[in-house]
Amino acid sequence: MTSSIAAGGRWDTMISKCLDTTRPFPAVGISFGLEPITAALKSDIKSVTQAYIIPINTVEESIAIVQKFRDEGINAEMDLLGRSPSKSLNHADVYGIPFVVFVGEQEL
C-alpha cells in the first residue's frame, strides 16, 4: 500500500454540487497521511549520543562519569528519569545509542 504524505486541491465545484447550486464557492482543502508521516519520523530517530549512562542509585557518581566522557570528547547522556534498567536499555536501543554504561554499587 502506498500513501501520500499530503494532498490538496480546489473544492469550488464540489461544494456547489453538494449544495445543489450553480453558484461557485471558492475553497481549497488539504489532507495529511498520518501513517507515512509517522513512518518517516520513526525511521529518522537516531541520536548522536555515543554512550548512555544508567545510574542505579548512583546519580552523583554517574554525573561525574558523564562529565569525564564529555571532557574526552565522547557525547554522553544520562538517564535522569529514573527508568528501570530494561526501560533504559530500550531507550538506548530505540535511539540507536551504541554503548550503555551501568553505574551501581553491585554488579548486575
Image: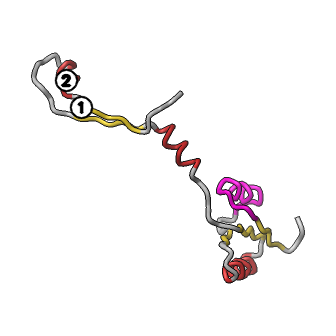
Residue 26: image location, x then y, percent: 16, 32
Q: Nearer the viewer, residue 60 or 25?
A: 25
Residue farthest left in this picture: 23
Q: Is residue 27 magenta?
A: no
Label 2 with label 1: CB-CB less than 8 Å: yes
Quarter of the image for residue 47 reads: bottom right
Q: Which residues are magenta?
A: 83-99
Q: Which residue is located at x 53 percent, y 48 percent? A: 41
- Residue that badge 1 annotates: 10
Q: Secondary structure at mark 2?
A: helix
Q: Which residue is located at x 10 percent, y 23 percent? A: 23
Q: How many marks?
A: 2
Q: Residues within 10 Å of mark 2 (few under 14, many from 20)?
A: some
The amino acid at mark 1 is Arg
Q: In the picture provided, is 50 more to the left or to the right than 107?
A: left
Spatial distance from mark 2 to mark 1, Cα to Cα? 8 Å
Position above or below: 33 against 71: above
- Residue that badge 2 annotates: 13
Model colouring: secondary structure
Residue 25: image location, x then y, percent: 15, 29
Q: Quadrant of the C terminus?
A: bottom right
Residue 36: image location, x then y, percent: 50, 38
Position above or below: 12 against 106: above
Quarter of the image for residue 54 reads: bottom right
Residue farthest right in this picture: 107
Q: In the picture provided, is 82 more to the left or to the right than 14?
A: right
The amino acid at mark 2 is Thr
Q: Secondary structure at mark 1?
A: strand
Residue farthest top in this picture: 20
Position above or below: 71 against 54: below
